[in-house]
Image: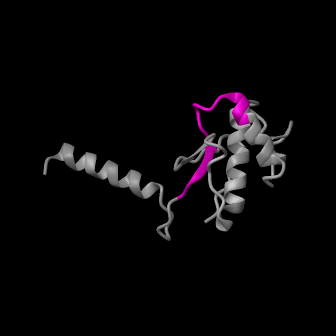
C-alpha cells in the first residue's frame, strides 16, 4: 500500500472514530438548517422555548450563548437543548424541517452545547 493511500485511510478512520464516544454511540447535536428562512426558524424557536420545554435561558441577553445574536444561532441552541433533553422520550431533531443533525460540536467560546447519550 502506498504512503499516500495509507494517509488517506488513516484520515478517514480518525474522522469516523472522532464522532463516536468510547461506548460506541455516535455523538449528535441538533442545529438549525442553514437553508431554513429566518421566519420559519423563529416559529420553531418560539415553540422550542415555549411549549416544547427547551431551557432557553442561556440565549438571553448577557448569557453565554446570546452572542452571536442571530435567529439561526439562538434556534440552534434551543433545538439542541430540546433534542438532548427529550430524545430519550422519542423526540426528534425535525422542527418542521428547520433543523438537522450534525456530528460536529457547535459549541463556541463560552457557549457549550449539551450532549446526552
Name the residue: 20% across, 46% down: 5
Q: Is residue 104 left or right of residue 5?
A: right
Residue found farthest to the bottom = 23
State which quadrant residue 109 falls in: top right
Please provide percent x and percent y for residue 58: 80, 46
Residue 71 vs residue 106, the one in the foreground: 71
Residue 83 vs residue 47, the one in the foreground: 47
Q: Is residue 51 left or right of residue 25?
A: right
Please provide percent x and percent y for residue 1: 13, 51
In the image, residue 100 above or below residue 86: above
Residue 98 vs residue 105, the one in the foreground: 98
Name the residue: 62% across, 48% down: 94
In the image, residue 65 above or below residue 17: above
Q: Is residue 36 magenta?
A: yes
Please provide percent x and percent y for residue 30: 62, 49
Quadrant of the drawing holding the C terminus: bottom right
Residue found farthest to the left = 1
Q: Is residue 42 magenta?
A: no
Please provide percent x and percent y for residue 10: 30, 52
State how the image is colored: one colour
Name the residue: 50% across, 60% down: 26
Magenta region, residue range? 27-41
- Count up the numbered dots: 0
Amino acid at each position: 500500500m502506498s504512503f499516500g493511500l495509507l494517509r488517506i485511510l488513516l484520515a478517514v478512520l480518525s474522522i469516523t472514530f472522532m464522532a463516536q464516544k468510547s461506548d460506541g454511540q455516535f455523538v449528535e447535536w441538533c442545529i438549525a438548517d442553514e437553508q431554513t428562512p429566518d421566519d420559519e426558524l423563529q416559529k420553531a424557536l418560539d415553540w422550542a422555548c415555549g411549549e416544547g420545554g427547551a431551557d432557553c435561558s442561556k440565549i438571553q441577553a448577557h448569557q453565554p450563548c446570546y452572542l452571536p445574536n442571530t435567529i439561526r444561532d439562538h434556534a440552534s441552541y434551543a433545538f439542541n437543548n430540546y433534542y438532548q433533553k427529550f430524545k430519550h422520550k422519542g423526540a426528534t431533531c425535525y422542527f418542521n424541517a428547520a433543523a438537522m443533525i450534525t456530528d460536529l460540536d457547535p459549541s463556541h467560546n463560552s457557549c457549550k452545547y449539551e450532549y446526552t447519550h
